[in-house]
């Protein structure tokens, strides 16, 4: 009896560890850069790639992406999106401290002193504005072998669940929409799909509660997906889709191209 109970406890712990390993935490930063500051910002971004690589090597973060916006926002709103990947919510909320950044910057540039690095970082902060930051938790994703590489496309769809229908919306994404995306992936019309939930508490005035990441290998795959018609869907499936659409408000769609990634 004791062995059975012990086995059950061990099994629960292992399942919890597997789940924790599969759950990712992402921080999205929407960045605005003035035209006159573009060159200095790109130079700063190139330096920061080395910083994030050192952070990955130090197991501080899981990865970092740099996306350039193709459409979805006014030109003056923001032009770039960065995504930093973390293994758990605690490290996500702590993020990279200023001390961490200085340390990793000096690893990448050993000829610089701490004072020189601090001065460079302070000067770099004036090259851009952080328009928005979102802390997200992965809820579900498709089964695929999509490989992230420079040049891939992503559609970032910001959603707001209808008040009182939070779980209805998530269930609709997982039970109705995810199978549709999975089918498209198997037909070569999509790379991958992920549903993310806002990881921080929010109120009724929050701009969005969820975000979906729709990945495509290139523009050919993206436009083929747009033209694809779900001809095989049944009446019941179309009814479920219609019901699912009523559980959320699609606030905005951003199309972006991956310019850099660190893993």
Image (cartoon, rainbow, N blue to C red):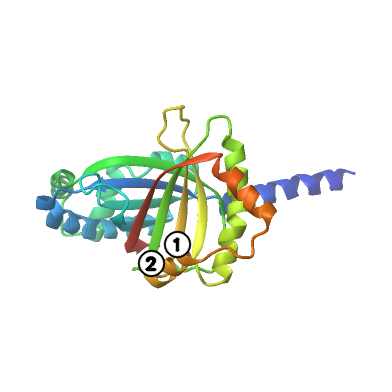
Q: Which mark is residue 181?
A: none
Q: Secondary structure at mark 1?
A: strand
Q: Quadrant of residue 49?
A: bottom left
Q: Residue at x 25, y 52 (%)?
A: 79
- Position of 241 compared to 133: left or right? right
| 47 versus 132 height, above or below | below
Please say whether residue 19 is visible from this viewpoint. Answer: no
Q: Residue at x 57, y 41 (%)?
A: 169
Q: Secondary structure at mark 2?
A: loop
Q: Residue at x 55, y 67 (%)?
A: 185
**Residue position marked by numbered label 2 in the rendering:** 152
| 35 versus 188 height, above or below | above
Q: Are marks 1 and 2 in contact (CB under 8 Å)?
A: yes
Q: Which mark is residue 215?
A: 1
Depth check: give the residue in front, 35 or 236: 236
- Quadrant housing the N terminus: top right
């Amino acid at each position: 009896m004791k062995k059975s109970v012990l086995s059950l406890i061990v099994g629960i712990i292992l399942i919890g560890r597997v789940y924790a390993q599969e759950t990712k935490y992402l921080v999205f930063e929407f960045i605005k850069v003035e035209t006159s500051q573009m060159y200095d910002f790109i130079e700063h971004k190139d330096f920061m790639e080395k910083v994030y690589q050192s952070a990955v090597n130090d197991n501080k973060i899981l990865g970092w992406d740099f996306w350039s916006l193709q459409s979805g926002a006014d030109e003056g709103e923001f032009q770039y999106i960065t995504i930093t990947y973390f293994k758990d919510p605690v490290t996500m909320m702590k993020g990279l401290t200023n001390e961490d950044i200085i340390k990793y910057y000096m690893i990448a540039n050993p000829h610089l002193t701490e004072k020189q690095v601090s001065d460079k970082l302070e000067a770099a902060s004036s090259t851009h504005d952080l328009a928005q930051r979102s802390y997200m938790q992965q809820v579900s994703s498709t089964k695929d072998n999509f490989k992230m590489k420079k040049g891939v496309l992503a559609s970032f769809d910001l959603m707001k669940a209808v008040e009182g229908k939070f779980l209805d919306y998530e269930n609709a994404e997982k039970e109705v929409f995810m199978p549709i995306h999975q089918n498209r992936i198997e037909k070569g019309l999509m790379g991958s799909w992920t549903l993310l939930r806002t990881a921080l508490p929010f109120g009724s005035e929050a701009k969005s509660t969820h975000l979906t990441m729709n990945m495509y290998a290139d523009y050919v795959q993206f436009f083929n997906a747009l033209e694809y018609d779900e001809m095989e869907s049944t009446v019941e499936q179309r009814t479920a889709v219609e019901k699912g659409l009523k559980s959320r408000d699609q606030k905005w769609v951003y199309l972006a191209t991956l310019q850099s990634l660190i893993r």
